[in-house]
Amino acid sequence: MDYGPGLSLRIDRLEHDGWPLYADFRLQIAPGQTVALIGPSGVGKTTLLRILAGVETGFQGQALVDGRPAAAAPVPGIVFQDARLLPWLSCEANLRAVRSDAETQDIEQALAAVGLVGLNAAWPRQLSGGMQRRLGLARALLVNPKLLLLDEPFVSLDRAVVRDLQALVQGLIARNQATAVLVSHDPEDAARLAHRAVLIAGRPVRILADLALDTAPGQRSRAEISAHVERIETTLTEAAP
Amino acid sequence: MTRPPDRATAAPAAIGAWPGWASVFVLVLVWQGLALWLDSRLLPSPVTVAAQIGWLAREGHLIADFGITLARAVTGFAIAMVLGTAAGLAMGRSRLADKLFLNWVVVGMNLPAIVIAILCYIWLGLNDTALVLAVVLNKTPLVISNIRQGVLSFDPAYDEFARAYRLSRRDTFWLVHVPQLTPYLLAAARTGLSLVWKIVLVFEVLGADLGVGFRISIFFQFFDLKGILAYTAVFVVIVMALEHLVIGPLERRLLAWTTDLA
């Protein structure tokens, strides 16, 4: 099976309300790599994902997905901070909303992949918070299992639910050999899921550090995860002005 | 301006239908009691009125009158809903259209119905076209105002979702916008029906030679309380039937996603 696409991002200038949010920003992501973007809230992480998704185009620079401009590349699988399901559609209809040509088999596979078999007809409101995120994940996979853009996918969930969901996301990324960009403020997300942690801060945004995290995600021991977390936190503290 | 139905109260209560039937029964009982107490010429009893309904249906014009009034109301209502929805969407989505037409809507909502009716009758003559046009002119601004409010209440998070997943304009409209508009459409339909009924009757008093309003004005000239109450009772039954057989079930179906009884 092939790896997901490589990403190449160059933002010469992006202004927000007249202030430069990004200037001379560069980021390369290799095919099949999972990169965690770690930074304080409000720094502009979501904007970066919107650029990679081809939604945000009002900037000077270039976002390439396998060499093609992001807006012309296949739609990536996007997971929003809130699950952002359409509450007036059943679970199955929520999946079909993003891919109207999906076969029954595709729907069943997507639901099975996130452990929601048999919930086709349920309303999103009837699902728990964790299950809603799973459905959001299934929706992303159905559209594009090769490129996943995850925007704080684990916030405001119980700790145990976060663990399950992290394991699920990690397994799905590995199984699909997907390229994934995970935006988070929590170093632990990076330590459990990512090959690389890119720490960003400031205005305009700059990269504080670009850390390669040893051992494949999913095979890390508790000690290794703690070590990664500590390394990220230390780097953040040292880089802080 | 009408708010969409509260989601919590849109849920059918678990206690069943008996309080609704009981309230109707009590109402008829009170009516009967009052009729016994008062002179029956001032307030005919429910039994007398029921008999009168039967007689008017057989010997009078009851069925033809209700047929024509229903046809006028439904036509005016349907045209007003379509026009109002289209204009409300346009005004909600375009600031220019909103600025251009908001004053028209405000004027339209506040023009007395009777003035519009009289003008239509003078310009177009005493005919059904004038009557239906008057209904449409009265009702459309209210629909516009409801729908416009609905559009302005759209959650931008869902638009962001539609953009990110590159939904077509058609899918965005049907999957993202129409469901958010549905409570407002239902509210517009409900208030619309009750308004249309009332103004159609008034317009029929003014200038029609058939219809419920026209007949009631005749009954009035003869102080025919039995006739007036007979027509009123039939009218109430039709309105209740519309509410419980059409709008209520439609609302429960369309808003099933908001309740636990889906």
Image (cartoon, coloured by chain):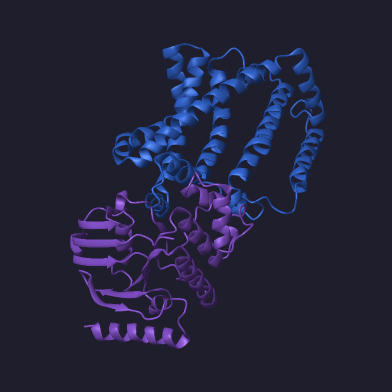
Asked if residue B6 shows in the view, the reply is no
Residue at 41% x, 41% y is: B148
Viewer-closest of A61 and B23: A61
**Residue B256 relative to residue B86: left or right:** right
Give how far across and how far down residue A171 sits, in percent. Answer: 49, 69
Q: Nearer the viewer, residue B209 or A185?
A: A185
Give me the residue at 58% from left, 24% from top: B201
Above or below, A207 against B132 in this view is below
Apparent side of residue B38 relative to residue B115 in the rendered image (left or right)? right
In the figure, the shade used to draw chain B is blue
The image position of residue B110, as x and y in percent, is: 42, 34
User: Where residue B178 appears, x then y in whole percent?
Assistant: 48, 42
Give the image quarter of residue B72.
Answer: top right
What residue lies at 47% left-to-right and 85% top-to-bottom? Answer: A221
Q: Quadrant of residue B98?
A: top left
Q: Is residue B69 visible?
A: yes
Q: How many marks on residues?
A: 0
Question: Image check: B70 left or right of B30?
Answer: left
**Residue nearest the viewer, comparing B225 with B73:** B73
Front residue of B220/A163: it is A163
Please state the horizontal and vertical placement of residue B214, each as a whole percent of the image.
61, 17
Vertical comparison of A223 with B81: above or below:
below
Which residue lies most toward the front here? Answer: A1
B166 relative to A45, above or below: above
Residue B155 higher or lower than B113, as above or below: below
Please name the residue shown 53% across and 34% down the image: B192
**Rendering colour (chain A):** purple
